[in-house]
Structures are given as C-alpha cells and as structure tokens.
Amino acid sequence: MRFAVLGPVRLWRGDVELNSGPPQQRALLALLLAYAGRPVSLDEMVDVLWGQDPPSSSINVVHRYVGNLRRLLEPGLPPRAEGGWLLRGAGGYRLKADAGTLDLLRFRHLAGQARSAAPAEAVELYAEALAVWQGEVAAGIPAEVRSLPVFAALEQERIMVALEAADVALEHGGMVGLLPALRAAATRHPLDERLQARLVLALATTGRQAEALDTWQAVRDELAEELGVEPGQELRAAQQRVLTEPADGLATDTVDTAHTVVRPAQLPADLAVFAGRRADLAKALALLDGDALRTVVISAIGGMAGVGKTTLAVHWAHQVAHRFPDGQLYVNLRGFDRQGSAMDPAEALRSFLEALGVPPHRIPVAVDVQVGLYRSLLAKRRVLILLDNARDAEQVRPLLPSSPGCLVLITSRDRLPGLLATEGALPMTLDLFPAGDARESLARRLGEERLAREPEAVDEIVERCGGLPLALAVVAARAAANPAFPLSAIAAELRGTPATLDAFADGDPAVDVRAVFSWSYRSLSAEAARLFRLLALHPGPDISAGAAAALAGEPVRRALNELTRASLLTEHAPGRYAAHDLLRAYATELVADSEDDRDAAMGRLLDHYTQQAHGACRKFAPFWVRPELGRPVPEFDDDRQALAWFTAEHPVLMSVVELAAQGGFDTHSWQLAWALERFLDQQGHWRDCATVQRHGLAAAQRLGHRAAQAHLHRALARASARLGDYHVAWPGIRRSLELHEELGDLAGLATAHRSHAWLLDQVGRYEESIQQAERALALYAATGNPAGEASMLHALAWTHIRLDQDCRAATYLQDALIKLNGLSNRYGDAGVLDGLGYALHRMGDYDRAIVYYRHALTLYRDVGDRYNEIGTLRHLGDSHREAGDHDAARDSWQHALDLVDEVVDPSTADEIRYKLLCLDMPDLVGAERGVRRSCRGGP
C-alpha cells in the first residue's frame, strides 16, 4: 500500500490506484494520513466530518467508514476484523504508515536527513523532500475540512522546510537545483513574505536579477491589493541586497530566518556539599576529550530514584559549562511523576524555544515544525542541554539537536535502550554510594569531627541508608538540625523503623527509602506533618508560601521552615518551594491514608488561585468586566506587581486550570479562565489562552452559567483569531454578542463589541470596525467605565490612523488621556501617549511627538513593559530623524535594538537595523532605479 496527502488524497495497492470513496470517507482518510500513524480520537473525527452540529448517528457513521476503508485496504477482510493497516487505539483509530508508504513521512524523513547532512548533500535532500509535494495538502476534500489546523500545520511545515532549504543554498550554493521547489512553495503561499524574500534572493543568485526585481514588485502589488500593506522588513532587505550587492556576493550570507538566539543559562544550582562519584565524574568528563564535539554527544544517566542522577548531571554540567559558550538549557520532563503526568515533548520544545528567544506567539503549531525550528536555532552553536527525569526515548528524541558541538545529558530511571541503539547515546548507570562515598557525604554535611566521635553509629547509618544519596541527605538533615543528638540514637531510630514506600522496596532493608522518610515525617510537628501531606494535592511544579497557606487553611511559615530544615522541601527561590519526586510520592501515600479533608483543601487551593488571579487582573486590566466571585479579592499594589505575579505563577496556573477541569471544579474553571485572559493575551501566550478558555467555556456550559458563557465565547474567539483560527472566532464573537444582548448585560456587551471591532480591524474591515468600536464606546460610557472608554478611544484612533485620518485620531487620543486622568492606569496612559506621538509625527509636528514619546517611555519602564518600550523607542527615533537630529535617532534605535536582544523579536530587530543603515545610506531609491534600468537595458 502507498498513501498520499501532500497533494490530492490518493492510495495505491501496488501500481493500482484505488477509489477512496465518497467525500466524507475521503476526508476521514485524509485526517488519518495527516496524523501520520498517530491515533485520531472519535471526537475529532466527528468534528472534522460534521463540525459543531453532528447527527446523532455520527459515531456509527464513522465506524462504517472505518470498516469500508479496512476492506478497501485489505479485500476479503472478515466483518469487524481489525486487519493490519487501520488499527484501534487511544479512543480512536490510527493508520499504520512509514516513510516507505506515506508521502508525509517520506517528506519528514528527507527533511530530517537534510538537517544533519553536509551542506551540498543537504540542498539535494531538501529539494527531494519538497518535490514530494504535489499540490495543496489534502486536495480534493471539502475546503472547510482543509482549513482545519491539522492540515494548515502541514502547509506551515512545508514553508519551514522551504525556508531552511533556501537558507542553506543561499549560504553554501546549490540554488539552481532547489529553485523549482522553492518557486512552487512561494507560488502556493504568495503572501508569505519570508518565502518571497528568499525567492527574490534565489533568482538573483542564479543570474536572474531582473526577474528577482520583477518578482519583488509583483509581491508588493499583491500585498497592497490583498492586504493593503507594504512589504515588510525582510522582503525590503532582500530587495536592497539585489540592488546593492553583486550577484556572486548574495550567497555569502543569508536572510535571518527566524530568531535572534539568546544565551540561556537554565542550569539548577550545583550542590554545595557534592560528594563522591569520582569515577563517574571522570568517565563523564572523558566524553568531551579530543574531537568529541565534532558530533552531538549524548549521555544517558540511569539508575534508581534517589540515587543522585540529577545531582551528578547538574554537577557535571557546571564543570563543563564554560565549554559551551552559547548557553545551557534545562527541563524536568517529569517522566516518573507522582501523578503519571509526564511532560509532553511539545511543552518542553516550547519552553526551549522561548528560552532561545522565540516569542510565544511566533512558535509554530505543529510539533515537527517546532523540532525543525529548534534544531535550526542550535545549528552551529555549542549548547549544553540537560534533560532531567525522562520517561523514555520517544519523549527525548524531539529535544535532541542535529548539529555537532552540543552536549546532551539525560537522566532517567529507564535505561533508554532505544536511545542507545538508534542515537548512539553513551550509557552511564549510577550505582548506590559505596561506603566511602556515603561517609564522605555525611562528613560534608555534618563535619569530620562529629563522625569521628561515633564511628560505629556512622557505619550503621551508612548501612541502613543503603548508599542511597537521598536517604543520606534526609538523615544528615535530621542530625544537623539536632546537634545534641548522638548519632547512635539516629542509627537506633533507623533500625526500629518498619518498611514503607513499597514501590521502592525489594526485600533488602538497605534500599528501603520509606523507612527513612517515615522516620523523618514522624519527627515533624503536627502542623508541619499535615502541611507535608496536603502538599501532595498541589499540581506543581512548585508552590508559593501563600498557596501553601491556602491549602492548609492556616499560617504555614513555621511549618515551611521546618520542612525545609528537614530536607523534605527545598526553597529554590525566595518564597517558592518544591520537593523531590520520591518525597512527593510519599506525601501522596500519606494523604490518601489520612483523615484530612482533601476536597476542602482542594477547594481552598482553587479559591486562592482564583482570587489572586482576579486581584491581579484588576490592576493589569482595570477596565475589564469583573464577575462577582462571592469571595474577597486581594488588592495588588500596582500593575507592575500584578504582571510580576502572573509571570511567576504562569506554569502553576496552567496546571491548576487542568486540575480544576479534571476534578470537576467547574465554577473555579470558568472564573480562572475569565481572570487569565488579559495576561495570556497581552504576553503572547495565545495557545495557553485558547486552552484555558476552552476549559472555562465547557465548564460554564455544564453549569448553565450564561453570563460566563457570554464572556468566554468572546475570549475564546479572540484567542482563536490570534492563532489564525477564524472559523472558531467568528461564531464565537457572534454568540457572545447574542448572549450579552439576551442577558441585558451592557458592561459585557461593551467588551464583546470591543473584541468584535478588534476582529474586524485584524482583517482590514476598518469601517465596520469603527462601527463596532463606537458601539462599545457608547456602552462603556453608559455603564460608567472611563478606563473602558479610554481603551476604545485609543482603538478608534489607531483605526483612523490606518485610514490616514491623523487629525481625527489625535482628537480621539486627547479625549482618551482626559478619560484616564486620575485612574492610575500607567499602561493605558503610556499607550495613549505613544499613540499621540505617532499621530503628531504623521502630521509633521516632530517636536511635540518627541515629548509625548518620552512620557510614554517613562511609564512603560515603570510598568516593566519592555515590548512596548521597544516600539516607542522606534517611533522616537523616527521623529528625531525627521527633525534632523540623527545622533538622537541613532541613540533611540540602538537602545531599542539592545532591548530586542533581550526579548527577541527578529522582525523588529531587522527593521531597526535597516533604520540605522539608512542613516548612513539615505539614497537607496536612486540605486533601485539604476539597477532596474541596467537589468532591462533601457532608460
């Protein structure tokens, strides 16, 4: 069998092409092919085939189509037999496929080979990969199905591979062979400026300068006609290179593809009392001798829980970090988490891409495209990567770089045989501490003198701890906290402790970790013991002191200090606590067997995060409509503190949202979604925002809470539009408006019209956007919300600026400033001041524009909003330049560029560099005309 989805949906048995059946059956086949061997749930199949209104018989119809496809693939297959191609699994079905049978997997296989090949071979492999495409993805199925994210992601994957291929060819040669595939991809995506920029350069490097400039002009015309915009920085830069560089010089460097890479430094702190492991450390350091880094060095550190895998890996990493000048990446993959919630590789990829400087909203949707971007960012760089607590080889593979020069350290309880066999990983299995290392560990923590006084007790402690470093650390903490206790008494307590932690017991008391933990637990005060148990209910990855107090329902400062002293918790950052996974597993067992009211504790915890989130939202977005919680909401000092809280708690909040959804806490679920929207939206965490809003909306629908549904339909619509998912956005905003109208909720209706105006503005429907914005403005005024009025006046101003109505825009902005007066809304004030500066600049009043920009800068810096500070600095530089002060313009743009290197926005960085270049090369227009004349041989 052979299958194709990168073009028309087709299948063959041998050389004979088969008819895949009616349109819905063909669409189902396309969906299975797009998932490329991964399971597709029945729910998703129903959604793809019928959208939001499936018939009651939809599941039966899906099963019938599956049966038809099975018999098509395997004639003579008995009824209800599964066969060998279309298999059941994970609540749905998957199609068995590999690179030899499915064009999508062949495309990915060739692209993967290209990423690790030498440049000349890589270009050929990239060209072969792109040639696999035979048209638009899944051609022949209904257009509304092809527009779904799963198919759109494949088109994005094609674009990313085409970009990678073009960059290699531009830098190393071979563009002639790649040009047809690049031209085909650019033709399929005529408005993708990244592709068009590379096509322009590709044509020029192959001697087609006139065609390159004609292509640039054609793209410019289409952008103007379709979107009403001029070419962006990347496309303009490509044109300038064609105009100003000789053809043979164009291939010496490449358009900056993706993102300026920052130097991450994510390693956890080294253990100050590290002891032993000399042989293991020497073996580890030897891996980097000689020419080792001409390849990717992968070391898999295995061993039982608590044996010190992470401790050794972190210590080793710190020893060699200086050899990796491009930074260190770290992630805890939670492979053996107490709740079984191993981290999805996509989540780890996103965290690494953000650490490498990719803004959240620029991270691709498809995991395979994320992998390609990640490996591209690491190409030609020397980075140390520590993948802690891995579950298996499949979890790790997407996180491995493909270029030489990197070191990957992996810790896992699994021996990862697949990784050893296929990736050439070098195994290192840690044994328990020998007696000498165990004694050294105790000596580093307790001092040589104390051990020398009771050598027999030390021997018994070493024996009872079984050489397990974690157990030794707990015992040493107990002894250090009680310097008057003789070590013989501690040895006696260990001797008399019954076995516990069954999961880590194998009949040998020497490795019974529960004995050590239970003894340490029994030494706690009642307050600390109760808190230790309840901490097992927190979803992690860490917990603040305030959340711990909410969980316990009482002050916990003394209890937290006690748990930290006993090494049962670690305060890894001021006021934030975490526990080793074995200790959390032990706490989980304890709370399950206790009389603690777990539901009440969970309710308090969710109350805490819900109230805190709403308190922060009130400062972060003061004009936002607020639901009545029925519980007190904390008061944050200002918008800066609110933003800092959201940022610190972001990973925890996402876990709490999942906890509320899975635990049936529907009221908390929709209230959290309401409070988190503005932060997630404004900080670019749009995928998280969509996830949170979906959970919240589902909860509100289960509760029949129509007001919450009205708000969350709007929130999900905005998040979906951010991701380009307009088939969700438009129905969502319409439903929100309907519900608010039915409820007579004028405040909510104002916000719904506000978002509707924004959606219309995003797609260039400016007159309709203004109508919606004016409705929102009137409603904000009617409900007494001056901050909301200011927000809409600001929005109206920008829409009028896009319509070249600058004087009217300035009037709106002046009115917005008046509305904001006395509201202590620095973020809103700064945005309006920046807008006024922009309007005045366009009107030629550069001196006043500069004054407004400087005021806006002060406020953005007070709030800590670096992203908008960059934008204002860019505008300030423009006004200085037009006013004739080139030195001041250079200072503003250079300062902006310095900040971009921290928050990383590559297109902005390119634009600023171009501005700086134009200060030295002001007359590029004449050069363009001259080149066009010489290329065409005419006047």
Image (tube, helix red, strand yellow):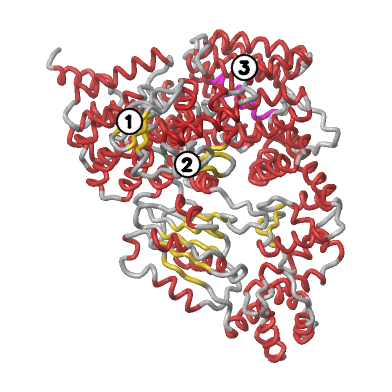
Q: Mark 2 points at which residue?
A: 367
Identity, as a three-letter code, of the amino acid under mark 3: His
Is 507 on the left-hand or right-hand side of 415? right
Label 1 or label 2, whichever comes before in sequence order: 1
How many marks the image carries: the answer is: 3
Helix, strand or loop for disc 2 = helix
Locate residue 913: give its quadrant. Answer: top left
Distance CA(mark 3)–CA(mark 2):
31 Å
Over which residues does the magenta segment extend?
825-837
Q: Residue at x 60, y 33 (%)?
A: 43
Label 1 or label 3, whichever comes before in sequence order: 1
Q: Can residue 623 be seen in this view?
A: no
Q: Which residue is drawn at 72% across and 71% down?
A: 514
Residue 918 included in the magenta stretch of the image: no
Q: Name the residue under label 1.
A: 17
Q: Which residue is drawn at 15% across and 17% down?
A: 936
Mark nearest the camera among 1 and 2 is: 1
